[in-house]
Image: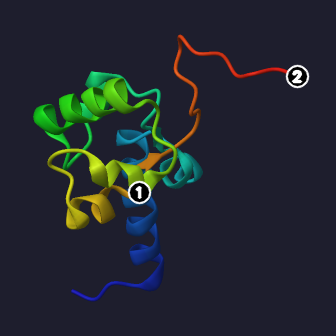
Amino acid sequence: MKLHSKQVSGFMFALVLSVGLLFPMSWAEATVNKIDINTATLEQLEAVKGVGQDIAHNILAYKKDHGAFKSFDDLGKVKGVGKVRLEALRETFTVGSTTSAGETSPTK
């Protein structure tokens, strides 16, 4: 059976469309949205591949004891997050607000 380029193109279009319907996030959202480790909930952290329950708890405990993460690399100070895991999580997390909910920024 020989396939023509129109048949292949039609199949590829149907395949891409069906994947888009299964995962309704735009490509821009998929590549831009990162989880802010300073505002993430336990559930959000646990849902990240490579984090799990123990490390999620460790992240929240570290933040409670040391305050907000000032840079992504501070995540490497969390128990259970070594160099390899840190690099694997680099594309997943971001560091946004460094002010905790109970803190206020100084005003002048």
Q: Tell me the SS state at disc 2.
A: loop
Q: Which residue is mark 1?
A: 73
Q: Position of residue 82 (x, y in %)?
A: 20, 60
Q: Quadrant of residue 56?
A: top left
Q: Quadrant of residue 37?
A: top left
Q: Nearer the viewer, residue 51 or 74?
A: 74
Relative to residue 18, is residue 69 drawn left or right? right
Residue at 24 percent across and 66 percent down: it is 83
Extreme residue in the bottom direction: 2
Residue lying at 38% horizontally and 32% vertically, measured from the top left: 66
Q: Secondary structure at mark 1?
A: helix
Badge 2 density bin: few <14, some 14–19, many ≥20, Cα 10 Å: few
Mark carried by residue 92: none
Instruction: Residue at 22%, 47% (x, y): give it.
Output: 49
- Quadrant for the C terminus in the image: top right
Q: Pointer 2: what residue?
A: 108
